[in-house]
Image (tube, rainbow, N blue to C red):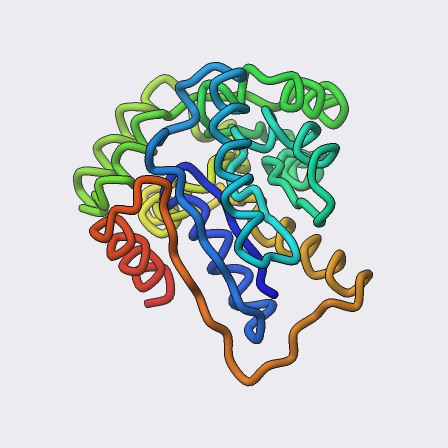
Amino acid sequence: MRIAFLDSGIGGITVLNEALKLLPDENYLYFADTLHVPYGTKSMEEVNACVKQSVDRIIKEQVKALVIACNTATSSAITELRSTYRIPIIGMEPAVKPAVEMNRTTGKRVLVFATELTLKQSKYTDLISRVDDQCIVDSMPLPELVEHCEALNFDKKNIQDFFTTKLAAFDLANYGTIVLGCTHFPFYNDILKEMLPEHIQVVDGNAGTVKRLSQVLLGTEDIHLGSSSKIEFMCSNNDPEYIKKMKRSLEILRH
């Protein structure tokens, strides 16, 4: 039995990469819903239908747990998924709470990068109202960054120019933390850190999600103690070139 990861594209590979660090002996299935990428620009109803279709396919692949490695899909579909399927299902949440705690006494603000749909969902707005008692969190949709990532555009100058344009309206001296609220965005962690002022920290929810996955597996006594892990990549349009892209993306992260 293996652990499955679902995203619309390659973004969730950043979460898989964290799992390989914490749970190196597990076997994994990574499924990209390439027929419907990206999720972040769709309606909640469309995302729910896409995710359900993908999970119906994944569930036939002998999986013991499923990580919805996408903030948009989590915020739209996680409740229905957990009521429909019997295996443990772990979702994503933007790391807003730890970011707020990090800045509680500094007087600095928090800026969240995410997709448009994630920022509109009640799961996100409820999170903000629950943890942001000092009203220090600002949000910015970056759907174009998902497109850059899916195109494997990691050209430093091009991406830095993109961030410079997007951040032009913000006085970065006022910010202490940037939250990467989409699993595609950690691909640009190093580029972003290099161009930001030193006082700004960049955080994401990947490590927390994998820690929760580990706790769930320990709770069910379903930790695999093999000698090495195996990873299978699948995509909804069965495109062998996209499977090569997914493997290449993981290599980029692990380099």
Q: How many labels does the image show?
A: 0
Extreme residue in the front direction: 60
Q: Position of residue 219 (x, y in %)?
A: 82, 61
Observer-nearest residue: 169 or 89? 89
The residue at 35%/60% (across/down) is: 250
Residue 23's place in the image compared with 44, above or below, is below
Relative height, residue 244 to residue 186 (above, below): below
Left or right: residue 155 compared with residue 68: left
Residue drawn 71% across and 36% down? 82
| Quarter of the picture holding the N terminus | bottom right
Left or right: residue 234 versus residue 152 is right
Q: Where is residue 180 in the image (x, y as percent from the top left)?
A: 48, 38
Question: Visible in this render: residue 12?
Answer: yes
- Image position of 23 with respect to 215: above or below: below
Specify the farthest residue to the bottom.
Answer: 227
Q: Residue furthest right?
A: 219
| Relative side of 152 to 178, left or right | left
Give coordinates of residue 124: x percent, y percent. Answer: 63, 23
Q: Give x and y (percent) for residue 135.
A: 67, 18
Dividing the image into 4 quarters, which one contains the C terminus?
A: bottom left
Q: Can residue 197 be seen in this view?
A: no
Q: Is residue 9 left or right of residue 6?
A: left
Q: Which residue is drawn at 60% across and 69% down?
A: 23
**Residue drawn at 63 percent across, 38 percent down:** 99
